[in-house]
Image (cartoon, rainbow, N blue to C red):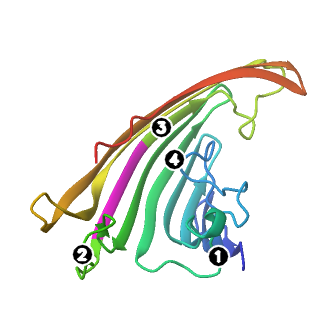
Amino acid sequence: GVREAWLRYSNLGIAGLGIQVGRQVLAYGDQRMLGGANWNVTGLSFDGVVVKYDSRHFASDAMLVRGTSKDGGANGITSETAAFDDSYLAGLYNTLKSDIVVVDVYALGLFRHLAPESVAGTTALSASAQQSNLYTFGARFTNRTAANKLPAGNKWDITLEAAIQAGNAPDVYYTNASGAVVSNSRTYNGRFFFAQMGYKVIDQMRLGAHIYYSPGTAD
């Protein structure tokens, strides 16, 4: 399959404003929310359009894309040769840049048309697909200002990132105590926090520690 195949036009009449169209990897920040998943055999890529603006102190990407790969096959791998119908990602990823810190602020929406889920052992379902909307809002702070690396001469690095999620999930169908198949409407309500600090002993050695907190969603 094709991992990347895109065209970029970098002169839309405003300095720093361009557009990229085609199959492309979306990788931002530390790639916790959007990344290439290069540890995977196929990785992740998307079909769509990204409008890009970049200047010395500010960058912004506005995207509307469709995913082309996901987990779920043998050993968690599926082919990336076909796009997934009725599954779209739209979002805005903004970056404020300085010589001291970088601050990312993002808003992402994942919109899918999915069949309702059923618990094993229940009656087969004939319900039509439902809309699933997942919204993510987050921010990231780091002093790794040299292409996400420490500037020359700096020893300590710190990164903080936090996000919340909300939206509606497809219903779950299950058999209740009376033997009837009923549905349970669900919503997304998640959050996470990440903090990391490290010290560069020498250029080839760094000591660090991090904490990660994510309680998930009640549904």
Q: At numbered mark 4, what does the secondary structure look like: helix, strand or loop?
A: strand
CA gap, disc 2 to disc 1?
31 Å
Going from N to C along the chain, the mark reached first, 4 or 2, is 4
Label annotation for residue 123: 2
Where 91 sits versus 201, above or below? below
The amino acid marked with disc number 3 is Ala
CA gap, disc 4 to disc 2?
47 Å
Circles 4, 2 touching at the beta carbon (< 8 Å): no
Label annotation for residue 94: 4
Residue at point 84%, 26% (across, down): 152
Q: Which is more foreground, mark 4 or mark 2?
A: 2
Circles 2, 1 touching at the beta carbon (< 8 Å): no
Percent coordinates x, y for residue 148 in the rendering: 71, 38
The amino acid marked with disc number 4 is Asn
- Report the magenta residues as a range: 131-137
From the image, tell me which residue sits under label 1: 79
